[in-house]
Image (cartoon, rainbow, N blue to C red):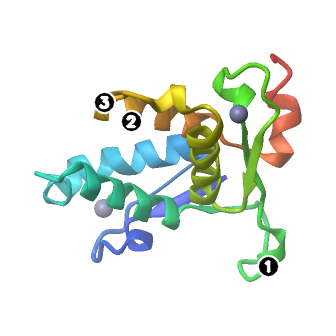
């Protein structure tokens, strides 16, 4: 389980927290909550500011393992996303990391280097869609073998 709370991203006085299996889902839940409960946080944001907010959310997301000691850092889960998960054929690249943001950054670095055609000429909305696809495709290492049976 991944989890993020308003406190994790610096919103004081709000007890809201959400959790889900996928990074993209957690982020969606949090953005939804912000839109409803803290609309002033996103009103009139530029693209850059919106990115910065998403980054804060991603930084706040952490893995929750059933029964794990909160201080057991070395048990943190590995997150991964592969080019194939995004529908890119003929590329075996896999981005891995402990933080969703790290994995996403690695994937976007790779896309910029090796598949620039995927992002060339995208507008704000289309780029956002691609980011959502990347986020939605990020899975836990442990889950990936089962989750990938469809591939
Ligand atoms: Zn809140
Ligand atoms: Zn690739």
Q: Which residue is mark 2?
A: 128
Task: Find residue 107 and report its image quarter.
Answer: top right
Which mark's residue is nearer the viewer, 2 or 3? 3
Which mark's residue is nearer the viewer, 1 or 3? 3
Foreground pick, 104 / 114: 114
Foreground pick, 93 / 39: 93
Label 3: how many Cα within 10 Å (few below 14, some 14–19, many 20+) = few
| Percent of width and height locating residue 106 | 64, 52
Q: Is residue 41 above or below residue 83?
A: below
On residue 123, which mark appears?
Answer: 3
Q: Earlier in the sequence, mark 2 or mark 3?
A: 3
Which mark's residue is nearer the viewer, 2 or 1? 2
Q: Earlier in the sequence, mark 1 or mark 3?
A: 1
Q: Residue at x 74, y 19 (%)?
A: 89
Q: Earlier in the sequence, mark 2 or mark 1?
A: 1
Dots 2, 3 in contact, CB < 8 A: no
Is the residue indicated by label 3 positioned so its CB lies within 8 Å of ligand 2? no
Q: Residue at x 66, y 20 (%)?
A: 87
Q: Quadrant of ligand 2?
A: top right
Label 1: how many Cα within 10 Å (few below 14, some 14–19, many 20+) = few
> Is residue 147 toward the left or the right of residue 128 in the image?
right
| Percent of width and height locating residue 24 | 52, 42
Q: Is residue 1 above or below residue 71?
A: above
| Percent of width and height locating residue 112 | 56, 41
């Amino acid at each position: 389980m991944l989890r993020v709370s308003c406190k994790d991203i610096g919103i004081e006085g709000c007890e809201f927290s959400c959790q889900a299996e996928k990074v993209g889902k957690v982020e969606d839940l949090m953005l939804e909550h912000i839109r409803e409960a803290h609309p002033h946080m996103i009103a009139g944001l530029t693209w850059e500011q919106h990115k910065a907010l998403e980054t804060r959310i991603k930084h706040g997301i952490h893995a929750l393992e059933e029964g794990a000691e909160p201080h057991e850092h070395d048990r943190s889960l590995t997150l991964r996303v592969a080019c194939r998960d995004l529908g890119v054929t003929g590329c075996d690249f896999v981005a891995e990391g402990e933080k969703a943001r790290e994995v996403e950054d690695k994937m976007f670095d790779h896309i910029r280097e090796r598949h620039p055609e995927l992002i060339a000429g995208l507008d704000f909305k289309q780029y956002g869609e691609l980011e959502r696809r990347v986020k939605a495709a990020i899975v836990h290492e442990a889950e990936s073998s089962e989750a990938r049976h469809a591939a």
